[in-house]
Image (tube, rainbow, N blue to C red):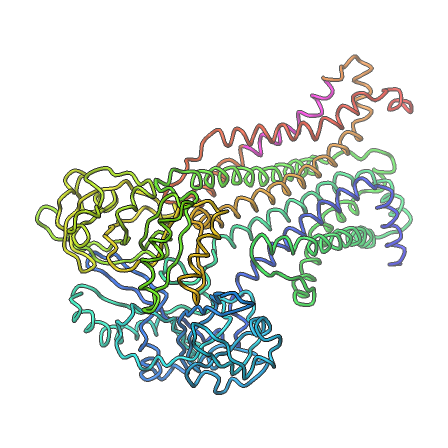
């Protein structure tokens, strides 16, 4: 019996090739899009869960409260915290500290920076899960200058993991002895570790030394109560950190330690000195998007299946007269759906396998699809889609009364018509919401990427210069050598231009006799900085090389600093200011410029003269002339990596996620529209075939081709216009929420909804008109021959 069901199902699919193709293309596209988004969201939500005890691991972070409640959040903590946690809290099983320590390694006669090297305690192997490939992790980091490599790095430098163990890697003239090789960490690890260096952090006893340099992780003996443990930590801050703050003169400053579950670390936001983070909202948005696209595809199937059901009415009538029971008919139609949906899933999995390499390249991920890893989800999703799409059409067909369908008296159910119209409205409403969303995202990304930054970084190369005692004495010579290069159009030096290197400090200033403690950003610059970056000077003057007092007393501030202090630009000039161990006055006010992302308001900024050797030298130069700069570098710093950044690329990278959101939104919106149009095309073809005799009679009575096309198109255009009305407020609310993440944002204009509505009507007319014109131009004799 089952075999005959499959045979009948296959014959039916083959007989109606167009509708079978529409079903397969629509369903496979929807399922593929949904599964791709599922793979990405699952990848994001399982960060660091490869660790055996991830539910018992937490990260400690620091928040510093300033006198004016400007909280500074740091992902890092003081050196002694880990030892204090282990010593004073019995619920703690182990702690580990990690300190970023990029290494310059010689490789194929070139110096290569390994950014993924970290100093770590030996206890890292107790807290996190590492699979040892070669060597022994038991004492791998207990002695000075020991190094543990990942398998990828070991193969890069030594050919194999086995050859690496016992070998030496030289970094900065310091030999590092490889004691073990561990398997590469999964790509969805928050801290990308390529190498671990031994370190003795316990030698440092000061809690305020080096401004909180280490990441601190805790392994608890049992699954912890994190809010409760966080309250306990305040005793440490009061007992150890506060006395040192008071001794430094920071009387009104307070530190607090916060706790994050390891599973939440990847989505932690707003912390200085943190690793690159994910965006939970991004995952939520695309999860909803996946469900919307899948819903459109499934509704397509239901709509076409119920619309086509009447054509099989006589088949149902004959089967019932022959003794078929309703459940047997339901079983047959469900098997037909099972076969068709099964084909669609096979095509969908093929599309996924073809798309994954491109998706990985686009998102910077390492997604993979192994059905056995997702077997439960895939089987569940397949069964759910099969039953959801097949049960209603199957019961609708099985419910036909044989006497009606065999006499030809079966009338079209108003309930069925209303359902199909409702489905069309829902499909197009969803597509319109996505299209409006894409339009808003596009214009917002255009706005933030093309806005006047008031800070010209075109063709600017920022070079990170050495900071060690040996090489810093040569930095000024390197600066002068660059200045003499004819290819260098202009040059400046200082710290802060890369955004992540901005210093933070409290600044003391007065307004109407009231002293304020303003926590603000600091740039260390030279006299060329303002003109080099074409920053507009609003009041006062620039710093000068010819005024000795400027090097120790001059402050340049931005508009945000002035407004926060309650001054006017004119009144700001000459105001006494104290910050970063300098006492001086404001000599100039510059226009706000966007040295950070436009997601945030421009923060108060003070610029002071760079008196020590700088961390960065910036030059304006053509990219083709950069090798000449590298030659100078290798002459002066032969043991250092030439580390440079094109600033325009660095600043554009701040908006990569926004650009990616725009691109993905556009792709999935196009998919949703195509799926909806496929369904509309099939529905129009069915409706047109059903009204063939009506069209023939109208033509005999003198109806024109345009009149018949208008008649057939009107119903669908009305449905699309209703979808526009339904979708518009939803789209406005959703996108207004999305725009709240931007300090500088566009307004959602009425023309966006009008443009999308017009486009929806045009697409509908194009989809409908082909079938309508063909029906209107058909010879009425053919359709009325049997009457």
137 with respect to 403 (left or right): left
Looking at the image, which is closer to me, 748 or 649?
A: 649
- What secondary structure prevails in the magenta region? helix
Is the residue 555 above or below the residue 209 in the image? above
274 with respect to 360 (left or right): left
Q: Which residues are magenta?
A: 707-724
- The verdict on residue 266 being magenta is no
- The verdict on residue 710 being magenta is yes
Is the residue 368 above or below the residue 149 in the image? above
Is the residue 680 above or below the residue 122 in the image? above
Q: Residue furthest top?
A: 702
Looking at the image, which is closer to me, 641 or 442?
A: 641
The quadrant in which the N terminus is found is bottom right
The quadrant in which the C terminus is found is top right
Residue 223: x percent and y percent? Answer: 44, 77
Q: State the residue at coordinates (83%, 54%).
A: 328
Q: Residue furthest left?
A: 513
């Amino acid at each position: 019996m089952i075999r005959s069901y499959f045979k009948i199902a296959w014959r039916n699919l083959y007989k109606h090739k167009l509708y079978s193709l529409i079903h397969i293309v629509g369903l496979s596209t929807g399922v593929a899009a949904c599964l791709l988004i599922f793979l990405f969201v699952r990848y994001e939500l399982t960060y660091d869960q490869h660790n055996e005890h991830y539910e018992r691991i937490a990260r400690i972070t620091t928040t510093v409260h300033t006198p004016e409640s400007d909280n500074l959040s740091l992902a890092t903590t003081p050196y002694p915290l880990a030892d204090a946690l282990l010593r004073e809290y019995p619920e703690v099983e182990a702690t580990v500290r990690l300190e970023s320590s990029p290494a310059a390694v010689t490789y194929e006669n070139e110096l290569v920076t390994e950014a993924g090297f970290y100093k770590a305690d030996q206890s890292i192997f107790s807290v996190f899960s590492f699979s040892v490939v070669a060597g022994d992790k038991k004492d791998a980091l207990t002695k000075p200058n020991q190094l543990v490599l990942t398998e990828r790095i070991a193969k890069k430098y030594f050919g194999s993991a086995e050859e690496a163990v016992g070998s030496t890697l030289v970094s900065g003239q310091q030999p590092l002895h490889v004691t073990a090789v561990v398997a590469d960490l999964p790509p969805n690890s928050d801290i990308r570790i390529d190498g671990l260096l031994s370190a003795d952090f316990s030698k440092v006893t000061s809690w305020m030394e080096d401004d909180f340099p280490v990441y601190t992780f805790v392994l608890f003996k049992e699954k912890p109560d994190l809010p409760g443990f966080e309250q306990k930590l305040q005793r440490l801050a009061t007992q150890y950190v506060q006395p040192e703050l008071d001794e430094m003169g920071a009387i009104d400053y307070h530190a607090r330690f916060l706790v994050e579950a390891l599973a939440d670390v990847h989505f932690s936001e707003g912390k200085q000195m943190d690793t690159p983070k994910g965006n939970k909202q991004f995952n939520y948005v695309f999860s909803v998007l996946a469900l919307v696209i899948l819903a459109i595809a499934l509704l397509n199937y239901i709509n076409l299946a119920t619309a086509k059901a009447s054509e099989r009415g006589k088949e149902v009538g004959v089967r019932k007269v022959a003794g078929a029971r309703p459940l047997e008919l339901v079983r047959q139609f469900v098997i037909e759906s099972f076969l068709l949906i099964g084909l669609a899933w096979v095509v969908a999995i093929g599309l996924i396998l073809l798309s994954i390499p491109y998706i990985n390249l686009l998102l910077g991920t390492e997604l993979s699809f192994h059905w056995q890893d997702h077997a439960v989800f895939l089987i569940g999703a397949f069964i759910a889609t099969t039953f959801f799409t097949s049960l209603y059409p199957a019961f609708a067909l099985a419910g036909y009364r044989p006497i009606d369908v065999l006499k030809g008296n079966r009338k079209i159910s108003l309930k069925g018509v209303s359902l199909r119209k409702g489905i069309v409205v829902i499909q197009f409403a969803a597509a319109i919401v996505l299209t409006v969303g894409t339009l808003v995202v596009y214009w917002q990304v255009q706005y933030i990427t093309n806005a006047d930054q008031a800070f010209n970084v075109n063709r600017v190369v920022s070079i990170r210069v050495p900071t060690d005692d040996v090489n810093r004495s040569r930095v000024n010579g390197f600066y002068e050598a660059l200045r003499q290069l004819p290819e260098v159009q202009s040059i400046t030096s200082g710290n802060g231009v890369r955004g992540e290197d901005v210093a933070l400090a409290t600044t003391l200033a007065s307004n109407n006799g009231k002293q304020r403690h303003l926590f603000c950003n600091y740039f260390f610059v030279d006299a060329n900085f303002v003109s080099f970056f074409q920053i507009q000077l609003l009041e006062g003057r620039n710093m000068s090389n010819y005024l000795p007092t400027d090097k120790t007393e001059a402050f340049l501030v931005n508009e945000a600093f002035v407004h926060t202090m309650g001054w006017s630009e004119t009144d700001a000039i000459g105001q006494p200011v104290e910050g970063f161990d300098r006492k001086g006055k404001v000599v100039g006010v510059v226009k706000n410029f966007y040295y950070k992302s436009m997601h945030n308001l421009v923060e108060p900024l003070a610029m002071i003269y760079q008196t020590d050797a700088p961390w960065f030298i910036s030059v304006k130069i053509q990219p083709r002339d950069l090798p000449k700069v590298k030659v100078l570098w290798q002459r002066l710093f032969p043991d250092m990596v030439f580390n440079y950044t094109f600033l325009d690329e660095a600043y554009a990278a701040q908006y990569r996620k926004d650009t990616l959101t725009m691109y993905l939104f556009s792709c999935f919106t196009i998919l949703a529209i195509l799926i909806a149009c496929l369904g509309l095309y099939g529905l129009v073809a069915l409706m047109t075939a059903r009204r063939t005799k009506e069209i023939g009679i109208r033509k005999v009575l003198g109806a024109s081709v345009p009149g018949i096309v208008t008649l057939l198109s009107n119903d669908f255009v009305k449905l699309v216009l209703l979808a526009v009305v339904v979708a518009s407020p939803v789209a406005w609310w959703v996108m207004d929420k999305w725009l709240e993440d931007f300090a500088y944002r566009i307004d959602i204009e009425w023309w966006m909804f009008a443009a999308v509505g017009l486009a929806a009507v045009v697409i509908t007319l194009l989809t409908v008109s082909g079938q309508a014109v063909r029906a209107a131009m058909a010879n009425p004799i053919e359709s009325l021959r049997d009457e």
